[in-house]
Amino acid sequence: MTEQKPLNVAILWHMHQPNYQEPGSPNMVLPWVRLHGTKDYLDMLLIADEFENLRLTFNLVPALLDQLDLYQKGGSDPHLDLSRIKAEDLTVDQRAEILATFFSAHPPQMIEPYRRYHELYRKTKNGGGALPSFFSSQEIRDLQVWSNLVWVDPMFHSDPLIKELIKKGRNYSEDQKQSLLDWQIKHLSRIMPAYVDRFKKGRIDVSFTPYYHPILPLLCDTDSALEATPSITLPKRRFEHPEDAAWHIDRAMELYHDLFGQPMQGMWPSEGSVSEQTAGLLIERGIKWIATDEEILRGSLKKSGIDPMQSPIHQVYEFGEALKLFFRDHALSDRIGFVYSGWEADRAANDFIEHLKRIRNLLADRLDEVVVPIILDGENAWEYFPRDGHDFLSELYNRLDSDPSIRTVTMTDAADRLPAQPLPRLLAGSWINHNFKIWIGHQEDNAAWDLLHDTRDALLAYTKDHPDADHELIDKAWRQIYIAEGSDWCWWYGDEHRGAGNEKFDIIFRRHLMAVYELLEMEVPARLFDPIYSAGAALKAEPPDSLLSPTIDGRLTDYYEWSGAGLFDCMKAGGAMHRVDHYISRIHFAYDHDFIYIRLDFAGRNCLDSIEQPVFKFTFDT
């Protein structure tokens, strides 16, 4: 019997949080490093331990690792501070803050399954949240416990303390609460040693992003955004600092070597953002491989004069001198991130494996040359899955581990072993719609870039005028610039991602720029005190920015299927739309050469979970 050749599958989990550190303080302004550290970063590694043949790549962000370390050095965050305070000692304002912010979790999977937490949630939503006096100290203490306990991954529910707290359910003591919070911090200390251990044993591969997760092509030159979107409106001042991009790469490589004892081999560039200029920086530094999205491949092939139909995505490519490129299978990666959360675990795993087997059948004569790159976020998706995705991941890993027709490989292994096809040119773009419109082009994004440019210029002018200035002070000021260059601030500017956190991210971004002036004892420009984010900007209908042909099947089969469509946000509108607010949250509209498309999102229904949405298609009357 002929031996079955396996299909190579390379899975990369990207673990990321922005830098939340308050300038000049060990404290973070938001709790997500700590909470996701309790829920996602360690269990994602430990689940894989159970499967001997499984090989995965984990991509870590250096700024995330710094913050994990800060918690070991006494760092805190407002949620943790409020949780620490004895319930009876809380002020009215502190109680109000707790009631307003301690339910920041996905209700169907993280609130409703826990009776006491759900009771408090319903009481708050039914009006009690406006009146903190309606809540007893015991209720507040139970909320302090549950808002932390619910983030403990199910893998650790057998821990004696966690098991006891879940079983008790309510009426917690102050000692029990403090024990839970201490357990959290100790848990965070286990994360990096576990990654280093599995890496040294050859069980996993580890890559890093540039240090503070910047969009490298835009740091090198904001005009690179014109390549994918020639009509885009750019900031008033061109930002062109490849030396800053190099700093982020170099510092990431240094930290990697310190932790793992060897040079870094590969990188998931922040948001899969690439350009020929940034590829050159990586080649100069000996990086073996990077990864981005399949849409970048199509654009790069067209730019190279190569027919995209003749060059499959499941192929290692090579740009320049020995830089291997992987292009994520967009549809398969997004099925894990945005589709399977509403499916039974065995059905979802079976669907994924069947997709892989279809790919294998199509590429049966080339299995020694191909690889299927699966790349996605390794933390945020799981709160939408039952049991934080454990059932799905265990089922999927079991099938990947035991099926002889499939072989999981690390990115570095694939880069070393598989032949690469030359790619003469590389399109400048990101994994989202092969462009940079999330981070530049909107008036809010552009305002942020201009403020960053002005603050950087002010720092340069200061160092020129003060050649004898304290080097440590100057380094601290530059550090604030590099933090402000991260991608996460502009992710929340513009109209793509509007929510409860936009204002907070706006404040954090401007605080980092203010800190530059404060460190140098210079007057902070008044414009830095003015918000960039404007909630009112979303009240008007945003027109479509390109032709779009979504699939009319009642489901959001691809997270970015409607990206680029026009949008009217009913939840932020008033006047004639006020009554509709109770039923319809958003109206999306798009068109192509033949049809007009309309999608209605109902209030309280989450299209990310593949809940059916009403969609309509109208023919143009020509």
Image (cartoon, rainbow, N blue to C red):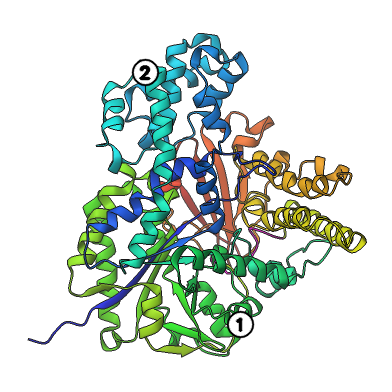
Q: Residue at x 43, y 25 (%)?
A: 178
Relative to 435, residue 481 above or below? above
Does the rendering let one see residue 569? yes
Type of amino acid at the residue the image marks with label 2: Tyr
Answer left or right for 299 relative to 535: left
Of residues 608 and 100, the one drawn nearer to the viewer in this rendering? 100
**Magenta-colored segment: predominant secondary structure:** loop
The residue furthest left is 1
Q: Label 1: which residue? A: 284
Q: How many marks?
A: 2
Answer left or right for 577 relative to 342: right
Is label 2 in a helix, a strand or a loop?
A: loop
Quadrant of residue 151 in the image?
top left
Answer left or right for 616 relative to 577: left
Q: Earlier in the sequence, mark 1 or mark 2?
A: 2
Relative to 161, residue 333 above or below? below
